[in-house]
Image (cartoon, rainbow, N blue to C red):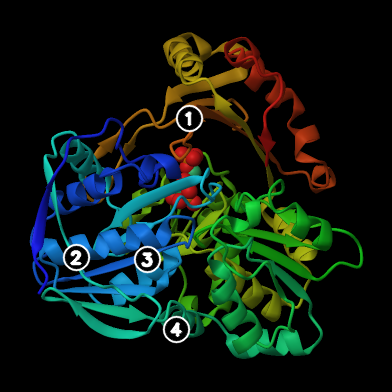
């Protein structure tokens, strides 16, 4: 017999969800009651979940299984009727979103700190996704935060939970169903993409490397790319999920996916390279001699999506986060559909997707996805690219350069200043905000503002989402502080400039954007505020 236990607790400071849930160091999460307080605060903020289904899964990082078991016990003690959990507590973020939707679940708890490093000294995270499969909207995350500040107790119960065996068992009066993490996701991908054409492409000798970055996507990629599509063995590298991601930073960008980039970029490398992050929602796309920026990837996907069976009837609209380049806007204009500009954070796409206003969404932060789930989806983007490559029978390089020829090129770069002292970063942003009225008119800046978003579906308004300096020729510099870091502050500086002249398209973005980059550093005097003369990461 198992009994509900009520454990007394006290609020913790700082359990405020950021861009994508609560992210803290493992050591913080491992403190007594820390994870429990947050999970109970989520439950306390929801209503009507009695006897309903909750999906639970995580990216397998250090401390994943411990928190999965805590969450299952608390779900049972709080009155959920059923928990669906991935075997060994594993579910990629997009797969979890799919399982929530497919099973009409009440919602889900996703345990991940995404692309942040793992291991005992790394990061951990928890976020709540609602019944649409998408991250909780701000109204809900604000309410969860308020609850974390007032919580006095949480409910849990004892009992064995065996995550290793597929099948159902009970805990108290709740059913615990352990499911295969990959099955449903693989079926969904098969329904969206032309698997026959992609298989034929692999048969024709097309070569690819997918870097699982020792994170969650490995098993998904191995099953789909090597198992179902016939990519040769070894197509997937670093395909076994490890709790510390092999000591690496599972962020699929040019810096952290160096091993893949060095393999694919040179002459003689494979035809196509791709990677995904810690929890499987981000993607990196490269071809021989061509890195595809996430902003360009979104635009190219939007322009070619009808080649995939799941999108053959066309797109209703496109959405991008504000700092993402305007390349997708040009495609949308040509297609005669709307391009929405939202704040950073996938949660802002949810309403547009639910209301049928957008089909494909993307962010400069290596995230692309569609209305098939309510999260960005790394492997989806890779399969979309494979679908495009299989139908167009051109190289990645040609597809990208032809896209620039047809639409012009939005040169783009992001400079990150990581682990800057928080007060200094906040001061820099405040000074910039204060100087907005006088910036317009200087340096050919036609508009200087702090981005605000009015959600066209629920009318909610979100302010202070990034300082924008927009120049007379349409070039932009954007400043914002990351909402996903766990140490100090990360200043992100986004620089973009449009070039219609094909003869100039082959420049290195750092060269093409050099004058703007100089201005981006000098206007707020980044060096003075942060003591940094160069960014830590350039993408
Ligand atoms: C999260 C969000 C994304 C956002 C990204 C970067 O990604 O889901 O929507 O673009 O963070 O946010 P920031 O610039 O605030 O660090 P992920 O992959 O970490 O879940």
Q: Position of residue 479 (x, y in %)?
A: 52, 27
Does the numbered disc 3 mark a residue whose Cβ is under 8 Å from ligand 1? no
Helix, strand or loop at mark 2 = loop
Q: Is 298 in front, or is 532? A: 532
Of circles 4 and 3, the one toward us is 3
Of circles 4 and 1, the one toward us is 4
Of circles 3 and 1, the one toward us is 3
Which of the two labelled residues, at mark 2 and mark 4, occupies the earlier sequence position? 2
Residue 390, by quadrant, is bottom right
3D distance between C-alphas at marks 4 and 3? 14 Å
Residue 183 bears which disc, if any? 4
**Residue labelled with disc 2:** 158
Which of the two labelled residues, at mark 3 and mark 1, occupies the earlier sequence position? 3
Please identify the quadrant where the C terminus is shown. Answer: top right
**Residue labelled with disc 3:** 57
Please identify the quadrant where the N terminus is shown. Answer: bottom left
Taking 210 as reference, is 504 above or below it?
above
Of circles 1 and 2, the one toward us is 2
Q: Is 147 in front, or is 139? A: 147
**Residue labelled with disc 1:** 481
- Whether residue 408 is visible here, answered yes or no, is yes
């Amino acid at each position: 017999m198992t009994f509900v236990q009520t454990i007394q607790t006290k609020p913790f400071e700082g359990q405020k969800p950021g861009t994508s849930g609560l992210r803290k160091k493992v050591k913080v999460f491992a403190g007594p009651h820390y994870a429990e307080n947050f999970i109970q605060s989520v439950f306390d903020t929801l209503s009507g979940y009695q006897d309903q289904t909750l999906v639970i899964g995580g990216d397998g990082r250090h401390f994943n299984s411990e928190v999965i078991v805590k969450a299952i016990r608390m779900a049972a003690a709080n009155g959920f009727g059923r928990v669906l959990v991935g075997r060994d507590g594993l579910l990629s973020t997009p797969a979890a979103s799919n399982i929530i939707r497919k099973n009409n679940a009440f919602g889900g708890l996703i345990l991940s700190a995404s692309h942040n490093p793992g291991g005992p000294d790394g990061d951990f995270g928890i976020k709540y996704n609602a019944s649409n499969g998408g991250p909780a909207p701000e109204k809900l995350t604000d309410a969860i935060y308020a609850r974390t500040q007032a919580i006095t107790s949480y409910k849990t119960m004892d009992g064995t939970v065996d995550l290793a065996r597929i099948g159902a068992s009970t805990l108290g009066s709740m059913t615990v169903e352990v499911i295969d993490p990959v099955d449903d996701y693989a079926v969904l991908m098969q329904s969206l993409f032309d698997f026959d054409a992609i298989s034929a492409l692999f048969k024709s000798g097309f070569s690819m490397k997918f870097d699982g970055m020792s994170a969650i996507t490995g098993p998904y990629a191995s099953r789909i790319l090597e198992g179902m599509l016939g990519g040769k063995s070894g197509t997937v590298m670093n395909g076994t999920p490890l709790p510390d991601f092999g000591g690496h930073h599972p962020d699929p960008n040019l810096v952290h996916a160096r091993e893949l980039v060095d393999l694919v970029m040179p002459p003689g490398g494979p035809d196509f390279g791709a990677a995904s992050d810690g929890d499987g929602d981000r993607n990196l796309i490269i071809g021989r001699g061509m890195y595809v920026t996430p902003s360009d990837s979104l635009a190219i996907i939007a322009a070619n999506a009808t080649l995939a069976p799941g999108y053959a009837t066309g797109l209703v609209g496109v959405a991008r986060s504000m700092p993402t380049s305007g390349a997708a806007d040009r495609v949308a204009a040509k297609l005669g559909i709307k391009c929405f500009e939202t704040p950073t954070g996938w949660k802002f796409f949810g309403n547009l997707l639910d209301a049928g206003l957008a089909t494909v969404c993307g962010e400069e932060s290596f995230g692309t996805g569609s209305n098939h789930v309510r999260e960005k989806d790394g492997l989806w983007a890779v399969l979309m690219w494979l679908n495009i490559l299989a139908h167009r029978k051109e190289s990645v390089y040609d597809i990208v350069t032809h896209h620039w020829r047809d639409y012009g090129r939005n040169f783009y770069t992001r400079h990150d200043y990581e682990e800057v002292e928080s007060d200094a970063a906040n001061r820099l942003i405040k000074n910039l905000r204060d100087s907005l009225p006088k910036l317009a008119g200087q340096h050919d800046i036609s508009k200087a503002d702090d981005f605000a978003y009015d959600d066209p579906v629920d009318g909610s308004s979100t302010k202070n989402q990034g300082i924008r300096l927009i120049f007379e020729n349409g070039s932009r510099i954007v400043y914002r502080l990351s909402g996903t870091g766990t140490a100090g502050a990360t200043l992100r500086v986004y620089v973009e400039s449009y070039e219609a002249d094909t003869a100039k398209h082959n420049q290195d973005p750092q060269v093409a954007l050099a004058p703007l980059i100089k201005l981006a550093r000098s206007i707020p005097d980044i060096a003075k505020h942060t003591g940094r003369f160069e960014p830590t990461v350039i993408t």
